[in-house]
């Protein structure tokens, strides 16, 4: 249960650090990063870090900071690939990102995601991404935890020059290649997706 909670968290609060030596603290941080590289780590003994916990709305996509929240997670997954491969997977949990150059059909994507979560919702611990939707000038942000998918949000603009669909998954006991293949086939993406 604790591994699952780390996998779906946006913020992980590290407590009782005074009871652990430096090596144990580094080991705990590495393990959290291996499970969920994009979670914000907060030290419970730092008042300035704790101050914003009850006021920050990390799920809101309405500000420039929240748009960075989406792209920061995508970048964290890219940066963490080597450490995941080196450390192995924790209780079958894997994080990976899919990118697609071609715009997605919004209806087809919605049906595909509904089917994926209906069949594997307990194993899809988290999904987050920005989608290049056919006919939209700006991306659509999606975010879900297991069977719960937050309402998609139309972002104001692309955060950078990259117009690819980028989706991060954290899953348990699912093959990323199966997810990639099913999305590509269902949404008729003729160009191959690249799994990071």
Image: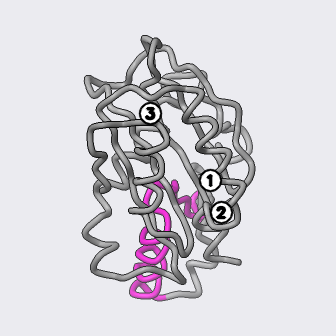
Quarter of the figure that contains the C terminus: bottom left
Report the Cα–Cα distance between label 2 and label 1: 6 Å
- Residue of label 2: 120
The percent coordinates of residue 74 (x first, y second) are: 39, 46
Task: Report, in whole angstroms, how far the alpha carbon at label 2 lies from the one at label 3.
Answer: 28 Å
Q: Residues within 10 Å of mark 3 (few under 14, many from 20)?
A: few
Q: Residue at x 28, y 50 (%)?
A: 194
- Whether residue 78 sits left or right of residue 175 in the image: it is left
Using the image as rendered, state which of residue 76 and residue 46 is in the foreground. 76
Q: Toward the viewer: 187 or 9?
A: 187
The alpha-carbon separation of the residues under discs 1 and 3 comes to 27 Å
The mark closer to the camera, 1 or 3, is: 1
**Disc 1 target residue:** 116
| Location of mark 3 (residue) | 68
Residue 100 lies in quadrant = top left
Nearest the camera: 96 or 73? 96
């Amino acid at each position: 249960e604790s591994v699952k909670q780390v996998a779906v968290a946006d913020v992980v609060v590290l407590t009782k650090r005074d009871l652990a030596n430096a090596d144990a603290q580094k080991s705990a941080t590495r393990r959290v990063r291996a499970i969920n590289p994009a979670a914000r780590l907060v030290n419970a003994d730092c008042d300035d870090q704790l101050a914003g916990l009850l006021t920050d709305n990390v799920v809101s996509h309405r500000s420039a900071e929240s748009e960075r929240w989406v792209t920061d997670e995508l970048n964290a997954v890219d940066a963490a690939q080597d450490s995941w491969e080196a450390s192995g997977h924790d209780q079958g949990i894997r994080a990976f990102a899919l990118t697609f150059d071609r715009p997605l059909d919004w209806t087809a994507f919605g049906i595909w995601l509904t089917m994926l979560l209906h069949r594997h919702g307990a194993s899809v611990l988290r999904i987050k991404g920005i989608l290049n939707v056919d006919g939209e000038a700006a991306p659509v942000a999606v975010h879900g935890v297991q069977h719960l998918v937050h309402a998609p949000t139309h972002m104001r603009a692309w955060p950078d020059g990259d117009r690819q669909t980028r989706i991060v998954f954290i899953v348990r006991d699912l093959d990323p290649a199966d997810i990639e293949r099913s999305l590509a086939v269902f949404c008729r993406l003729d160009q191959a997706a690249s799994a990071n």
